[in-house]
Amino acid sequence: MIAGIDIGGTTSKIGLVRDGRVLAQTRIPTTGHADDHAFADALAQAVRALAGTGSFPELTAAGIGAPNANQLTGIIEMAPNLPWKYDVPLARMVQDRLGVPCVLGNDANAAALGEWRYGAGQGYKDLLIVTLGTGVGSGFIVNNALVLGSHGNAGELGHMTLVMDGRACTCGRKGCLEAYVSIRGLRQTYTELDGDPEVLREEGVRCIADAAHRGDAAALQTFRHAVRWLAVGLANAVVVTGPQRIVLFGGIARNGDLLMAPLRERFQEALLNIYSGRVDLTVSALPDDDAALLGAAALTTF
Ligand SMILES: [Zn+2]
């Protein structure tokens, strides 16, 4: 049995995973701890408490997905959305406390491994997984291996420049794909198109999708733009690693009629002709609630 841990900006989820299923789960706050050591104590305690609640098999490993995590070093490197503004060697800290091997990985890579091992990517040797959420994360599987690069942080499709001198991105650069097709990106598009400010009173993009279904012109146009940008971004990625399949993950990708159907068409048009009809585009097969935990657990098995 593996402990899968997903570190988020406000909450960290912990799950016990076996054979691609989450047997039990709990959560602890990520914030409010005295320091990173106190957080690691709380994390280990929560894992032990959860494992002690049933007659689970013995814990053999722990996998942790976190923003800005470097799988090569086991360190969370100054993550802007986490409480610690310094490097945290969390893999070693959790390993010491739990007494089992621990692998730390970037949350997007964890999601990619989860999808590859347990979801819509099973059986594909060349795969690209893109998470559309607060940011845009991605993981590239090439020839049956996750691409980490020499520095441990390869495959950041969200920060590929899509528009020269375009929108400001959270990374400090301009025109990144993430600035256009993340939740923030879609909301910004809607605002730039003079959409109804009332619609944006709600967080996320569901509100824009609902408006589009009511016939709101700016909302419909927002999704059309997102489809165009995403089609080009994905087609650019294809010329680099030539995947057989691309899996999209996250709430935005769940908009079948507004996003996925037109995207499949635009993506084929944007592809370099040698790839035409040869790259399949699909949506994650994992339940949203379990995906991060399965992905974190999957980090330990590669
Ligand atoms: Zn960026």
Image (cartoon, rainbow, N blue to C red):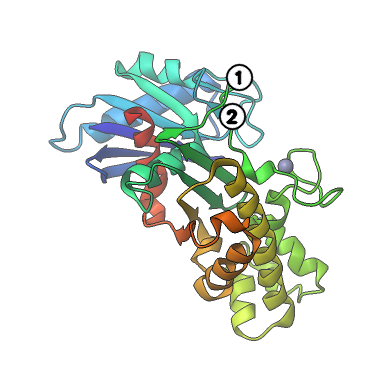
| Residue 29 in sight here | no
Q: Position of residue 249 (x, y in %)?
A: 49, 54
> Between 272 and 32, which is closer to the camera in this rendering?
272
Nearer-N-terminus badge (2/1) = 1
Real-space CA distance between mark 2 and mark 1, rounded to the nearest whole angstrom: 15 Å
Q: Secondary structure at mark 2?
A: loop
**121 on left or right of 226:** left
Where residue 111 sits, quadrant-wise, is top left
**What amino acid is at disc 1?**
Asp
**What amino acid is at disc 2?**
Asn
| Residue found 49% across the figure and 65% down from its top | 254
Q: Dot 1: within a 10 Å radius of its alpha carbon, few (fewer than 14), some, or many (20 or more) residues?
A: some
| Residue found 71% across the figure and 67% down from its top | 225
| Residue found 69% across the figure and 42% down from its top | 159
Ligand 1 visible in quadrant: top right
| Residue 264 in sight here | yes
Q: Quarter of the image containing the C terminus?
A: top left
Q: What residue sits right under mark 2 in the picture?
A: 153
Q: Secondary structure at mark 1?
A: loop
Q: What residue sits right under mark 1 in the picture?
A: 87
**183 on left or right of 123:** right
**182 on left or right of 171:** left
Q: Position of residue 290 (x, y in %)?
A: 36, 49
Residue 250, labelled with which disc?
A: none
Seen from this angle, which residue lies furthest front? 274
Q: Quarter of the image containing the N terminus?
A: top left
Seen from this angle, which residue lies furthest bottom? 215
Q: Position of residue 173 (x, y in %)?
A: 80, 40
> Between 230 and 88, which is closer to the camera in this rendering?
230
